[in-house]
Image (spheres, helix red, strand yellow):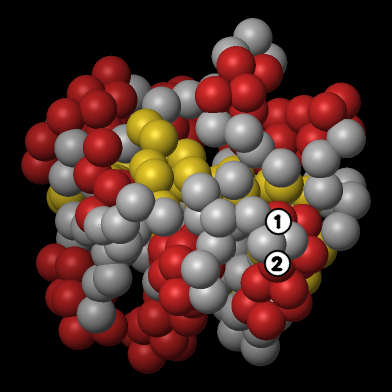
Amino acid sequence: MLWLIGGTQESAMLARDLVAQGMCCVATVTTAAARRLYPDTERCRVWVGRLTTETVGEFLQTHSIRAVLDASHPFATAVSELAIATAAHFHLPYLRFERLSVEGGFPEEWVFPNFEALLESNRLANQRVLLTIGYRYLPLFQPWQDRATLFARILPSQEALAGAIAAGFTPDRLIALRPPITAALETALWQQWQISLVVTKASGHPGGEAIKRQVAIDLGIPLATIARPALAYPQVTRDRAIALAFCQTALGDMTR
């Protein structure tokens, strides 16, 4: 069985490819809502939860894992680090499937290596800021609630809403939407809130990065972009064919 680290559009496409080629996988996701991304078949099982160093060994044994294909979100560094360490410890083949990045060229963009660098700068001061970064990072911005007017777009889940409110966001400064978000809706939202700065992550096309760049150009609103974390992946590909060939080699003729 292949461990497919999922929760992304790319992982769902890979799961469908694997099933089509007769290979079996167990896709790990962190929310029950992510189940809908994956094919409903015995060849693709979906495991919901968060693995840890204490539980991952049992997971590998239970599902007879023989290889790891890491198609997690570019900012989900904890699960990638766990997978890399686990693969090394148990001598399992590991491959990182990395989504394509969006090329630069936007004239009013400030790129920061991490959130700390942005928060230590003065870019947010007195701005009407839209945060499109996910609710888990919102607590970092709590000290800025009285130095800027902060708005946040989050996923429509109780967990995300509770996290945003705990970080100091009032309901009138929150909107809960699930991607993909069209350029027209993005434009209307920015104009409605009179946004003067947008904070985003370098998440690639599936994260709506290209649309945000285009809307920012159209409206003349600068972006503050958080660069992808740099991890030392043992091996990386952006090619689905290469990823599938890796899985075929690792699993051989095994079908379960």
Would you say the residues marked 1 and 2 are in contact, meaning their CB atoms lie under 8 Å apart? yes
Where does label 1 land, which residue? Answer: 251
Taking depth in this image into account, of 236 and 204 the one nearest to the observer is 236
Q: In the image, is residue 241 above or below residue 118? A: below
Residue extending furthest toward the top: 54
Taking depth in this image into account, of 160 and 234 the one nearest to the observer is 234
Instruction: Give coordinates of residue 184: x percent, y percent.
Output: 19, 84
- Dot 2 amino acid type: Gln
Give the secondary structure at mark 2. helix
Q: In the image, is residue 252 above or below residue 121? A: below
Instruction: Give coordinates of residue 126: x percent, y percent.
Output: 41, 47
Q: Is residue 242 left or right of residue 88?
A: left
What residue sits 71% from the left and 42% below the top? 66
Taking depth in this image into account, of 76 and 26 the one nearest to the observer is 26
Residue 162 appears anywhere in the view? yes
Q: Quick one: label 2, few (<14), some, or many (20+) residues within 10 Å? A: some
Q: In the image, is residue 59 above or below residue 98? A: above
Q: Which mark is residue 248?
A: 2
Give the secondary structure at mark 1. helix
What residue sits 88% from the left and 35% below the top? 91
Q: Is residue 248 left or right of residue 3?
A: right
- Dot 1 amino acid type: Leu
Residue extending furthest toward the left: 172
What residue sits 83% from the left and 28% below the top? 90
**Which quadrant of the view contains residue 58?**
top right
Q: Which mark is residue 148?
A: none
Instruction: Give coordinates of residue 112: x percent, y percent.
Output: 70, 54
Instruction: Give coordinates of residue 138: x percent, y percent.
Output: 41, 33
Q: How far apart are marks 1 and 2 (CA)?
A: 5 Å
Q: In this view, does 54 lie to the left or right of 26?
A: right
